[in-house]
Image (tube, rainbow, N blue to C red):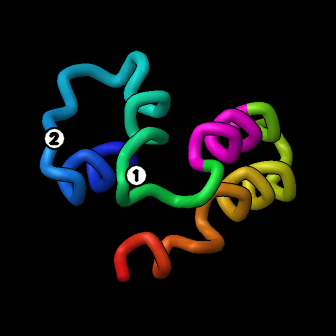
Amino acid sequence: MNQVLFALNEDYLLNEKGAVAIAAKFAICPTDYQQRVEQAFALLAASSKSITEAIDSITPDKQKTIA
């Protein structure tokens, strides 16, 4: 997702560390992106339900981001 956001905003992704914080400031970026990514990582666990919730927390408006 970070790589796509950097490409859409015509910027270079130099390294993964800090990329979410940088991407969150882009003009083309999902609403509350950084908070949603952090929430997704917090939800990650061994259960498939929590992994599904983590994925859903960062993807609901992906079409709106691209449009």
Q: Is residue 34 magenta-colored? A: yes
Name the residue nearer the viewer: 14 or 24: 24
Circle 2 sits in a helix, a strand or a loop, which is it? loop
Name the residue nearer the viewer: 39 or 51: 39
Q: Which kind of residue does numbered mark 1 sit on?
A: Met
- Comparing marks 2 and 1, which lies closer to the viewer? 2
Residue 4 image-quadrant placement: bottom left
> Please, is residue 28 above or below residue 47 in the view?
below
Q: Which residue is mark 1?
A: 1
Q: Is residue 18 left or right of residue 45?
A: left
CA–CA distance between discs 2 and 1?
14 Å
Residue drawn at (40%, 51%) of the image = 1
In x, y percent, where is residue 53? 79, 58
> Please, is residue 2 above or below residue 48 in the view?
above
Name the residue nearer the viewer: 18 or 49: 18
Residue drawn at (68%, 34%) of the image = 38
What span is in magenta? 33-41
Q: Earlier in the sequence, mark 2 or mark 1?
A: 1
Q: Which kind of residue does numbered mark 2 sit on?
A: Asp
In x, y percent, where is residue 19? 38, 28
Circle 1 sits in a helix, a strand or a loop, which is it? loop
Q: Main secondary structure of the magenta part?
A: helix
